[in-house]
Amino acid sequence: MWPLIGIAIVVIGFALRANPLAVVVAAAFGSGLGAGLSIPEVVAAMGKAFHQNRYVSVPWLALPVIGLMERAGLQEQAAALIARTKAATSSRILLIYLGFRQITAALGLTQIAGHAQTVRPLLAPMVEAAAARDKPDISDDERNQVKAMAAATDNVGIFFGEDIFLAIASILLIKGFLESAGIFVQPFDLSVWAIPTALAAFAVHGTRLWRLKP
């Protein structure tokens, strides 16, 4: 049970609103020491994991650029543009983004958009501005609703679009899980059968977006 102490450290650390990086590192050390590893072995394991998954950190390189653009008024300019374009309603903007996100994810371009690089600095301000233009007396709850729907649209687009691209980790995960149960399928077959799912997800979430009224 001692290796599970890392979970307790994470729960307590986040409950106390401690620094997330410090909490994660402390949890890693707690689990490692609880499993009987020495401190050098824990450090070596963390270094090996970081080295093997270093490509995951590549998108973070774009964050400083996005931060500078936001400081220069990116959100304000995006909101002002939408406020002047009456045809750009919240529903239409999100429907276009949903299609864009699914298509690019299906082509393997999963990092071309996302919460940090697209939703927060561009998409959310745009749909909020459109909602405020169409309803001047919009409440804070309604503003939060359209911003939450912007985040949800990104999630739906990437989740149901990426499986169409056969060279993606999720396809390999599904293939491995099925093989462990004695079911053998090819990645291409999984990708093909992901297309109806993606279309259904677009139809369901698209209907929600079309009915979105802030």
Image: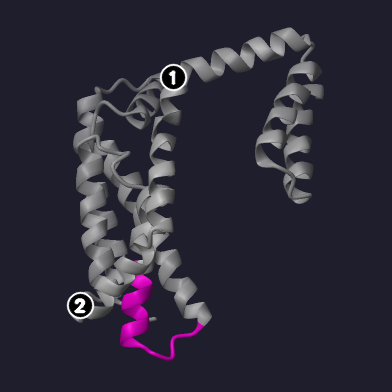
The picture places residue 92, in percent across and down from the top left corner, at 23, 70
- Count of numbered tags: 2
Amino acid found under the numbered disc labelled 2: Thr
Residue at 46 percent of width and 79 percent of height: 142
The magenta region covers: 126-139
Q: Quadrant of the C terminus?
A: bottom left
Is there any visible trace of residue 206 in the rendered image? yes
User: Regarding mark 2 in the picture, which secondary structure is present there?
Assistant: loop
The picture places residue 7, in percent across and down from the top left corner, at 73, 35
Gap in Å between the C-alphas at discs 2 and 1? 53 Å
User: Regarding mark 1 in the picture, which secondary structure is present there?
Assistant: helix
Quarter location, residue 187: top left
| Label placed on residue 180 | 1
Is residue 26 inside the magenta stretch? no
Q: Tag 1: Cα neighbours inside 10 Å, few (<14), some, or many (≥20)?
A: few
Vertical comparison of 147 with 87: above or below: above
Vertical comparison of 66 with 177: above or below: below
Viewed as shown, does residue 92 lie left or right of 35? left
Residue at 21 percent of width and 43 percent of height: 104
Q: Main secondary structure of the magenta part?
A: helix
| Label placed on residue 44 | none
Viewed as shown, does residue 14 lie left or right of 165? right
Q: Tag 2: Cα neighbours inside 10 Å, few (<14), some, or many (≥20)?
A: few
Amino acid found under the numbered disc labelled 1: Ser
The picture places residue 22, in percent across and down from the top left corner, at 71, 34
Residue on which disc 2 sits? 85
Residue at 44 percent of width and 86 percent of height: 138
Viewed as shown, does residue 106 lie left or right of 27? left
The reply to whether discs 2 and 1 touch (Cβ–Cβ < 8 Å) is no
Closer mark to the observer between disc 2 and disc 1: 2
The picture places residue 157, in percent across and down from the top left corner, at 31, 51
